[in-house]
Image (spheres, grey):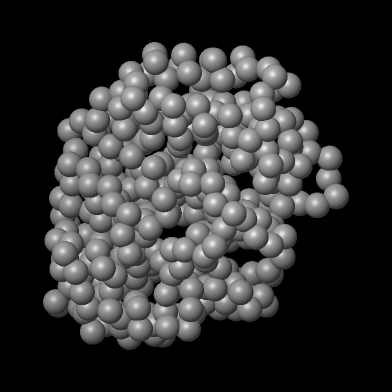
Amino acid sequence: MGYDIWNRRYTGSKYKLSEWIIDLIENNCVGNSFCDIFAGTGIISYSMLDKVNSLFINDFLFSNEIIYKAFFENAPYNMTKLENIKEQCNKENVKNLSDNYCSKWYGNRFFSYNDAKLIGYIRDNIETLKNEFNEKEICILIASLLYSADKVANTVGHYDAYIKGKNIEDKFIFDLINPYDTREKDIVITRYDANEYARDLKCDIVYIDPPYNSRQYSRFYHVLENIASWEKPMLYGEALKPAPQNMSEYCRSSAPIAFKKLIDALNCKYIVVSYNNTYKSKSSSSKNKITLEEIRSILENKGTVKVFDKSHRYFNAGKSDFTDHKEYIFIVKVGD
């Protein structure tokens, strides 16, 4: 079967809202180029794939960049070679494998010991294939490992902590993602800070779905980041996180300032902003750093604003209580 881009657990995923969001974009925006500047899972990029000629996909997480390249990059790959690697990895007898970085740090924590050993073995093996496989194929293998690992992770859906006091079963199976056919499209994949990227971007429609609370995505998904980059750093604390990196201003009190700078810098015809009202959350870490009123005010200085909302159940992996939760979509016609 293989994995599609939405087959992962991700806080704030727009998978269940994607059809509604795309309908709003189609009915209120006109253009042939689209930028997903905080792409996250990539589901909105995927949903726009057959609706525009040029697609710009950006996120500053290392794992997400690899995932986008694996699914979307317009480059050749040999699926037979990749299937052979998959079969070889799944035939490995884990008892014959040596302990490795992944089993040392994550075994009996984020994964069972045997699953962690196999994940580390496969990741080490991928490194040895870089002279035999092209970049697209390597990205497919790494992305496939991330999706396969995420499926069996001993977590509630993110990696801020692992579930304690539980017997973790060996469940890992290495399966491949299903890359998309983008041969007729102009695809640009980048890993930049969105505010810096906005200064040089020229695009018809820009979709913005930044983090709005104090939960840093580089910390929430540090295990996947670590497996993707494979730099094997020292890990610290109970959750075994590396030293902080890729920390977002949108998760701090300076978020309104960062958002205004982003909007002011954009050179486009339409701006589409997703916003959810988790400012009502009882959890301080889940509360929004930008209010609905601040977003509306900033956007109104850029052009004519339409606002749409939809009630839905927020993907919440923790204990935060979100009542009357809504997703808001702001659509700005720039310059009007």
Position of 237 compared to 263: left or right? right
- Please indicate, yes or no, whether residue 223 appears anywhere in the rendered image: yes
Q: Give the quadrant of residue 301.
A: bottom left
251 over 183 or under it: above or below: below
Residue 143, percent across and down?
45, 37
Position of 131 compared to 76: left or right? right
104 over 277 or under it: above or below: above
Residue 158, percent across and down?
61, 54
Identified at 38% across, 58% down, the residue is: 60
Identified at 39% across, 63% down, the residue is: 209
How many numbered tags mark residues here?
Answer: 0
The quadrant in which the C terminus is found is bottom left
Q: Nearer the viewer, residue 232 or 31?
A: 232
Residue 133, percent across and down?
34, 24
Identified at 63% across, 17% down, the residue is: 92
Identified at 44% across, 27% down, the residue is: 128
